[in-house]
Amino acid sequence: MATGIEELFRSFWPLVLGYLCRRTGDPGLAEELAQETFSRATGAILGWRGEQPAAWLLAIARNVLRDHARRGRPLVPLDESLLEAASPGPGPELEVRDLLGRLPGSQRRVLELVYLEGFSHAEVAAMTGTTPAAVKTLVWRARASLRALYQDDATR
């Protein structure tokens, strides 16, 4: 069991640390949160159902990050926004949420992971077992679908 945990640590430390560093903007804090992530993973390894290890660890990292934010420490705001995909209008946040709900599940999920959760294409690829290029293509298609839904609604 120790070898499995050690392998997870060696293989996925850079991925987890990179995600947390981008979200916090502080390499020292990101390292502390990454350590907490692997500590929680060690405690939960018996409950791991064998899914993608990157997805499992990034989900734990996201929860560690949320716990950190709940304690009142600010996170770095994400640069990209889903609102770029739609032109501004009355209540754009509500329109985008409605449009997201009408997208196919895989397109909606990839947009949520990239734009709302802040994962990079490489991290989403690791979670889904695909390549970063495939994720980039899916994001591009999902944005095009979102734009088409918006334009369809605008012409009504």
Image: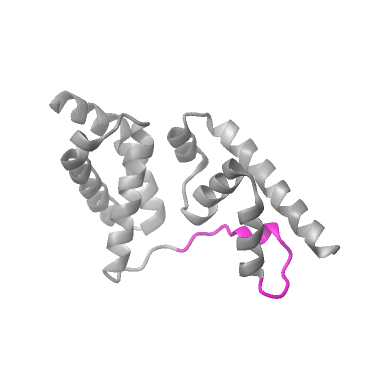
- Residue 72 in the image: state x and y as whole percent: 29, 71
Q: Is residue 82 left or right of residue 74?
A: right
Q: Is residue 23 left or right of residue 135?
A: left
- Which residue: 31% across, 53% down? 63
Q: Is residue 34 left or right of residue 91?
A: left
Secondary structure mostly seen in the magenta stretch: loop
- Which residue: 81% across, 64% down? 154
- Residue 36 in the image: state x and y as whole percent: 21, 49
| Residue ranking furthest to the bottom | 90
Q: Is residue 80 magenta?
A: yes
Q: Is residue 30 magenta?
A: no
Residue 83 lies in quadrant: bottom right
Q: Considering depth in this image, is 70 or 149 the residue closer to the camera?
A: 149
| Residue ranking furthest to the left | 2
What is the quadrant of the C terminus in the image? bottom right
What is the quadrant of the N terminus in the image? top left
- Which residue: 50% across, 48% down? 113
Residue 97 lies in quadrant: bottom right
Residue 141 lies in quadrant: top right
Q: Considering depth in this image, is 45 or 38 the residue closer to the camera?
A: 45
Residue range corresponding to the magenta coloring: 77-91
- Which residue: 48% across, 39% down? 124
Q: Is residue 105 above or below residue 134?
A: below
Q: Considering depth in this image, is 46 or 85 the residue closer to the camera?
A: 46
